[in-house]
Amino acid sequence: MIHVAAAVITFMNSNSESPLDDFTQTLSLKNRDTGMIRSHQVAGAGARCLAGLVDLGSQMVTFGAMAWLAVTFRPDLFPRSSWGWAFPVAFAEWHIIYLMLFESFTRGASPGKALLGLRVISLDGSPPSSRSLIVRNVTRVVEIALGVYTFAYYRINQMGSRQRLGDRSAGTIVVYAAPLTEQLYLSETPESLYSTSEDGYLLQAWVEREQRFDEESRMASAIDLAAYLHAKYDASTRDLPDPATYLKNLYDAEKQHPGTQAPELGI
């Protein structure tokens, strides 16, 4: 048992290079059917723990009701001498069935996940398959039995993909169902280019990461992004200045005076 637990922990520590965008905590996934690429904000351990507690409470209430009915009306099925092992085994089975039923018929959202705005998706952005749901939920029971489930949640925020062992085995990931901009809108964050719009995120992400690009990629991305922002927010007959300089000046101006329109930069 100790060797198996050690193997599990080693597997969880492997392949931890982060594929996430450092700024927005999003992961871009390409749908294998449509070929479309969409960014998903990946859920961390906090939101997933809260969702799990909601689901656990719901499972305990429903299982308790079913157990009471079984003991009351069919006591021959559950003699008192078997309660010590029968009910834990039955609850583990109900735990798997409960999550699989909801995640299958709600496109990856158990009641707890739906309450927290989360859902399970495959690594190509599509709804999870039945096989994936079986693997990720059975693995959860194995993690609990091995005593590494708490450690698994601790490791979620340190893993690049924010996946526990069950997700990695099943090829799934837990994300926020709503786009990041919609989440900010629902939280009544004041609208501004710098703090909420996708254009603002593009601008900040480029400025903060430009040093990671090779020179060719840096200039190509600067030209494309600067041309897009210049045409959308600073449309005029003026020629576009040096793209990288334009983006840095726009970023500095937005940090000082955020607004829904880019400021006149005088360049």
Image (spheres, rainbow, N blue to C red):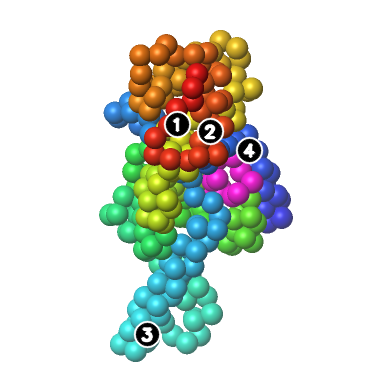
Q: Is residue 112 above or below residue 66?
A: above
Question: Residue 113 at x, y = what percent?
Answer: 41, 58
**Could you say which disc has been placed on residue 253 in the image?**
2
* 61 relative position to 215: left or right: left
Considering every residue shown, the one lying at the far bottom of the view is: 72
In three-dimensional space, the C-alpha distance between marks 3 and 4, rounded to whole angstroms, equals: 45 Å
* SS class, disc 1: loop
- Amino acid beneath label 2: Ala
Task: Give whichever of 32, 63 is nearer the camera.
Answer: 32
Q: Is residue 221 above or below residue 123?
A: above
Residue of label 1? 263
**Could you say which disc has been placed on residue 130 in the image?**
none
Choose mark 4 or mark 2, whichever is in front: 2
In three-dimensional space, the C-alpha distance between marks 3 and 2, rounded to whole angstroms, equals: 65 Å
Membership of 160 in magenta stretch? yes
Residue range (magenta) = 156-166
In three-dimensional space, the C-alpha distance between marks 1 and 4, rounded to whole angstroms, equals: 41 Å
Choose mark 3 or mark 4, whichever is in front: 4
> For the point 59% across and 23% down, which residue is it?
210
**Nearer-N-terminus badge (3/4):** 4
Callout 3–callout 2 Cβ contact below 8 Å: no
